[in-house]
Amino acid sequence: MSQIFDALQRSEAERSGNEQNGSSRATELLRQAERFMESKRGNGKAPENWEVADKPSQIALEEPPKLAQPPLSLLDKSAALPRDQHADATLRFEPIQISAAADGHLVCLPDAESLAGEAFHLLGVRLRHARRQQPLKKLLITSTIPQEGKSVCAANLACALALKTQQRILLLEGDLRRPSQAKVFGIQSRPGICEWLRGERDLERSIYYLEGAGIWLLPAGFATGNSLELLQSGKLSLMMDQLVKWFDWVIADSPPILPLADTSVWVNLVDGILLVARQGTTQRRHLKKGLEALGTQKLIGAVLNSSQGVANTDYYYRPSDRLRSDDSEN
């Protein structure tokens, strides 16, 4: 190390004036530092002629201030779900492979170009257009009485929206008394809304990604006791607020209107309502009572299920049939 000081001293001697004086002072300080280090290695004490005021033992680095962390319950976990990478979003929730039967009325998956599949695609297009005019992210699918096909319509609509867009679609099973989405998609019943409302399960662990359908499912779970009291616990609004942060569409399959009061709870939590009626099943008096119960504020339309007149119209066709027709004309 002394060789370094000798070279430094010879270099400083070549300079003149004030620069030589300042450099000499710097050289002397470096020599003192050398003696200090040698003394420390020898006896652990600084030499008596040590003159530098700011000794290393007097230098203290201030730690940066610690930022207070918010409680875990107040953290917004939605940032963990990427909005620009649709494939990565599936990793957040447990995946389930569906096995829908060919006669299970899930018409959008086996043959998306069928007449029924095109009808649900058209419904999805109209809903996206309506979304430009009003807030429409939480959609309730209901009916006046059971056996009108509301659950099947909700499942097909969710699949149709997922097939035609890159948006994240959640199918919410709001019928806690008679859940049927597991049967529609050919999967086993799993914990869901009931378990979350009872505090037995996290919301994130109650949602499943349906492989083969490209949508997410929040099932009803296993109800015990009075379902209406569970729905009226006051937690559903918090759940819906979190779901709209995670998903682009929330399609809620609710119970029928007339026999139960459960639907009134869901009506207050959604942006719009679609009323399903089945041709040959829905009676005029039931439909009238259902419309009176829903009101017109959130009702955006009706879906006629099992219509017999669709197959006889020229407005519905298979694109492949249309291509063959065009080729024959040429």
Image (cartoon, rainbow, N blue to C red):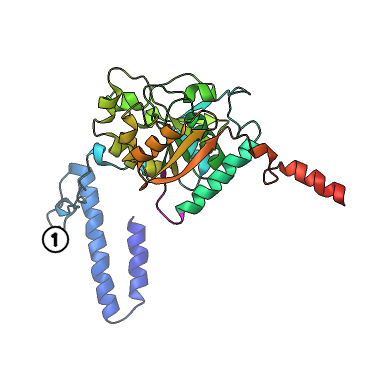
Dot 1 surroundings within 10 Å: few (below 14), some, or many (20 or more)?
A: few
Q: Which residue is drawn at 24% across and 34% down?
A: 234
Q: Which residue is drawn at 21% across and 51% down?
A: 64
Q: Position of residue 137 (x, y in %)?
A: 41, 46
Q: Where is residue 41 in the image (x, y as percent from the top left)?
A: 23, 44
Among all residues in the image, which is located at the extreme front?
285
Q: Is residue 201 in view from this perspective?
A: no
Q: Does the magenta stretch include residue 94?
A: no
Q: Where is residue 259 in the image (x, y as percent from the top left)?
A: 36, 26
Please state the extent of the stretch shown in magenta in the rendering: 132-138
SS at badge 1: loop
The secondary structure that dominates the magenta segment is loop
Residue on which disc 1 sits: 53
89 left or right, relative to 39: right
Asked if 257 appears above or below 138 in the picture, the reply is above
State the image quarter where residue 35 is shown: bottom left
Q: Where is residue 142 in the image (x, y as percent from the top left)?
A: 43, 34
Q: Residue at x 78, y 46 (%)?
A: 323
Residue situated in front as seen by the camera: 43 or 97? 97
Residue situated in front as seen by the camera: 35 or 240? 240
The amino acid marked with disc number 1 is Ala
Asked if 25 appears above or below 60 in the picture, the reply is below
Q: Is residue 272 in view from this perspective?
A: yes
Asked if 37 appears above or below 103 in the picture, the reply is below
Residue situated in front as seen by the camera: 103 or 235? 103
Q: How many marks?
A: 1
**Quarter of the N terminus within the rendering:** bottom left
Q: Residue at x 41, y 54 (%)?
A: 134
Among all residues in the image, which is located at the extreme bottom?
17
State the image quarter where residue 117 is shown: top right
